[in-house]
Amino acid sequence: MVEETLATLYMTAIASVATCILGLAIGILLFMTSKDNLWENKAVNSLIGAFVNIFRSIPFIILIILLIPFTKLLIGSMLGANAALPALIIGAAPFYGRMVEIALREIDKGVIEASKAMGAKTSTIIFKVLIPESLPALVSGITVTTIALVGYTAMAGVVGAGGLGTVAFMEGFQRSNNDVTFVATVLILILVFIVQFIGDFFTVRIDKR
């Protein structure tokens, strides 16, 4: 149980970091290429938006199956914690990307216009205005996404990714060991509560309103 808990923590941590980076990039691109923004480009915005909508809509368990050939090519196996990472990241990054876009849209346009009027470069606007101004929402968003990833790791466990999902399904459900299933479920809930507590703590500390 300890080993599989560590496997769940490993998958969640790696996938959360990668999702944060990719999702932030996707969200910024969606925002910057939208109407009346610095990189306004309808074609690019529509393309990225379609990618986000498609991968957000596919149920995770189906996404794992669809990505088996890609996972085998990339990792060399479809079993184990590392094999679950591509599906976890591809499944969560578009979701977080959309949350990033929503957070950026909440920023007062006057702040952005003032930065442009002072001659700020695009990179300065992104890293000195957009991200700092939306940071509480971004932290709250990655908290929600990380909790979703904990659930994704449990589903990934059903197809042999390891972690608490594998324990609950293989050792608990298939062998009718209800105690094992219960303990695995409780551990997942504790992990979710810890993630939520940490996310709320930092959101409150960052939010200066």
Image: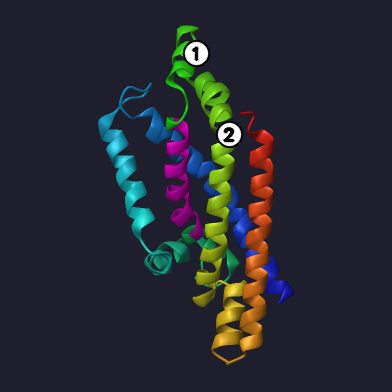
Q: Is residue 127 above or below residue 44?
A: above
Residue 136, given in percent of the width and then of the height, sits at: 59, 36
Q: Amino acid at mark 2?
A: Leu
Relative side of 62 to 166, left or right: left
Stretch of the chain drawn in magenta: 88-104
Residue located beneath label 2 in the image: 135
Front residue of this view, candidates 107 and 29:
107
27 is higher (above) or lower (below) than 81: above
The number of numbered badges drawn on the structure is: 2
Q: Viewed as shown, does residue 47 lie left or right of 95?
A: left
- For disc 1, the marked residue is 115
Magenta segment's dominant SS is helix
| 89 relative to 176, above or below | above
Q: Quadrant of residue 203?
A: top right
Identity of the amino acid at label 1? Ser
Hey, which residue is sitting farthest front in the picture?
209
**Quadrant of image for the N terminus:** bottom right
Magenta segment includes 79:
no
Mark 2 vs mark 1, CA separation in Å: 18 Å
Q: Residue at x 57, y 44 (%)?
A: 140
